[in-house]
Each structure stands twice: as structure tokens, then as C-alpha cells.
Image (cartoon, rainbow, N blue to C red):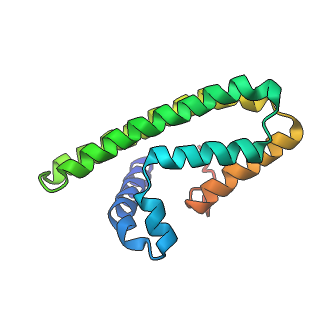
Amino acid sequence: MKRVGCIIAALFCMAILFSSPLMANTDAEKAQRQMTKTDRAEAQITDLHTKLKIAPAQEDQWNKLASVMRENASQMDILVYNRKAKLGTMNAVDDLKSYKEIGDAHTACLAKFIAAFEPLYISMSDSQKLIADATFAAKMNKHGHHKGHKPTAK
């Protein structure tokens, strides 16, 4: 049963990958797609710093998190650039391997983000934590990661 779930999840991810360029209809969505991950990271860093109301005592931890966000974005930009450069010459297997490489890097980047974010989160006031919780939940909902998903019994 787990194997079927994994296959469905992989197919869903592939559907998103292959359909995403067709889904952007507005000028804002097109402009967002054309931004590099580095550009988006800088915007997210500024936005999160403001939303989370980072206190002066938290700046050192915040700067570590911002540095990780920048490094992750740079790494992803390189992988995406390399993938785009090869798109016309890759066969189906190469295409899937390239997509897997990006997925693996995304997972590694998320692990680095969590490692840098957790100490900052622990240092936050209760009101900052509520804002962080709502901000990350909203982001996940926007991308459909929480919608309709219920934990399964093991």
C-alpha cells in the first residue's frame, strides 16, 4: 500500500513539474517564475524578517538563517540553470534523473534550513512563534501541501 502511495506522489510531482509552466496566467505569476531562486530568497528574507519582528537579540541567529537561505537559493539556481541548459538534449531518463537531482538538493536544503531555523524559533516569543506558525502554514497551504492531507495510521 505504501508503494502505491509513493508512486501516486511521484506521479503527482511529475504532473506539477510538467504542467507548471502552463499554469501561470497572470503577469505577476509570469514575473515570479522568471525570478531566480536567489531573487526570491532575498525577498523572502526581507519579508520574514519584518513579519517575524526579529529582535536585536535574535539578529545573530537570523543572520545565520538568512545565510543558509542565500546558499540554498544559489545552489538551486545552479541546478535549475544546468537543467534548463540541457533540456533540449536530454532523453526521458536523463530528464528524470535531473529532476531527481533537484529534488534531492531541495531535501538537503530544507534540512539545512530547519537546522538554522530551529534555534531561532526556540528563541522567539510566543507571539513571534504564532506568526511563524501561521506564515509557514499559509505557505504550505498555498502550494497545496496541507490541503486534504490527513495523517495515516501505521
Q: Looking at this rendering, what residue extends furthest in the bottom direction?
A: 25
Counting every numbered tag in the picture gives: 0
Answer with left or right where residue 128 lies relative to residue 152. Answer: right
- How far from the left and from the top, in percent, is residue 89? 11, 52
Answer with left or right where residue 43 lies relative to residue 58. Answer: left
- How far from the left and from the top, in percent, is residue 151? 63, 51
- Based on the displayed image, in which of its 4 quarters is residue 124 positioned? top right
At x 43%, y 60%, the residue is 33
- How far from the left and from the top, in percent, is residue 137? 68, 52
- Based on the displayed image, in which of its 4 quarters is residue 132 positioned? top right
**Quarter holding the C terminus?**
top right
Up/down of 62 relative to 31, above or below? above
At x 74%, y 27%, the residue is 59
Up/down of 122 relative to 92, above or below? above
- Based on the displayed image, in which of its 4 quarters is residue 63 positioned? top right
Report the front residue among 83 and 26: 26
At x 36%, y 72%, the residue is 22
Report the front residue among 117 and 145: 117
Can residue 137 be seen here?
yes
Up/down of 115 relative to 17, above or below? above
Can residue 119 be seen here?
no
Answer with left or right where residue 127 lies relative to residue 147. Answer: right
- How far from the left and from the top, in percent, is residue 60? 71, 23
